Image (tube, grey):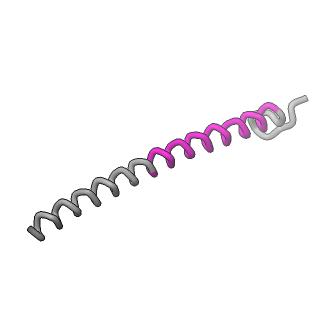
């Protein structure tokens, strides 16, 4: 009886942990994508202002 209950609780904990990790991973990827997009926008703005090699555009 105790072993069955322990197995059931362990399985439930494992499922909760797996769900939490999947959620955290999705959030991480969303934030990473957002930061990548923001970084690219900043680099694009710098290139438009200074030219591709850091030389000011006339």
Pinpoint residue 20: horizontal percent, then vertical percent.
Answer: 40, 53
Decide whether residue 25 is among the magenta residues: yes
Question: Would residue 7 be found to the left or right of residue 35 on screen?
Answer: left
Pinpoint residue 19: horizontal percent, then vertical percent.
Answer: 36, 50
Is the stretch drawn in magenta largely helix, strand or loop? helix
Pinpoint residue 56: horizontal percent, then vertical percent.
Answer: 87, 36
- In the image, residue 2 sits, relative to residue 25, either above or below, namely below
Place residue 6 in its image quadrant. bottom left
- In the image, residue 9 sits, relative to residue 43, either above or below, namely below
Question: Would residue 42 be found to the left or right of residue 49 on screen?
Answer: left
Task: State which quarter of the image contains the N terminus.
Answer: bottom left
Question: Would residue 14 be found to the left or right of residue 27 on screen?
Answer: left
The residue shown at (63%, 37%) is: 37
Q: Which residues are magenta?
A: 24-48
Pinpoint residue 2: horizontal percent, then vertical percent.
Answer: 12, 70
Residue at the left extreme? 1
The residue shown at (83%, 38%) is: 55
Residue at the front extreme? 1
In this rendered view, identify the residue nearer to me: 34 or 54.
34
Place residue 3 in its image quadrant. bottom left
- In the image, residue 11 sits, relative to residue 36, either above or below, namely below
In this rendered view, identify the residue nearer to me: 44 or 57.
44
Question: Would residue 42 be found to the left or right of residue 55 on screen?
Answer: left
The residue shown at (29%, 60%) is: 13
Residue at the right extreme? 58
The residue shown at (16%, 63%) is: 7
Place residue 10 in its image quadrant. bottom left
């Amino acid at each position: 009886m105790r072993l069955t209950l322990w197995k059931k609780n362990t399985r439930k904990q494992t499922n909760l942990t797996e769900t939490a990790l999947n959620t955290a991973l999705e959030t991480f990827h969303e934030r990473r994508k957002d930061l990548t997009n923001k970084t690219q926008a900043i680099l694009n703005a710098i290139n438009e202002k200074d030219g591709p090699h850091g030389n000011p555009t006339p």
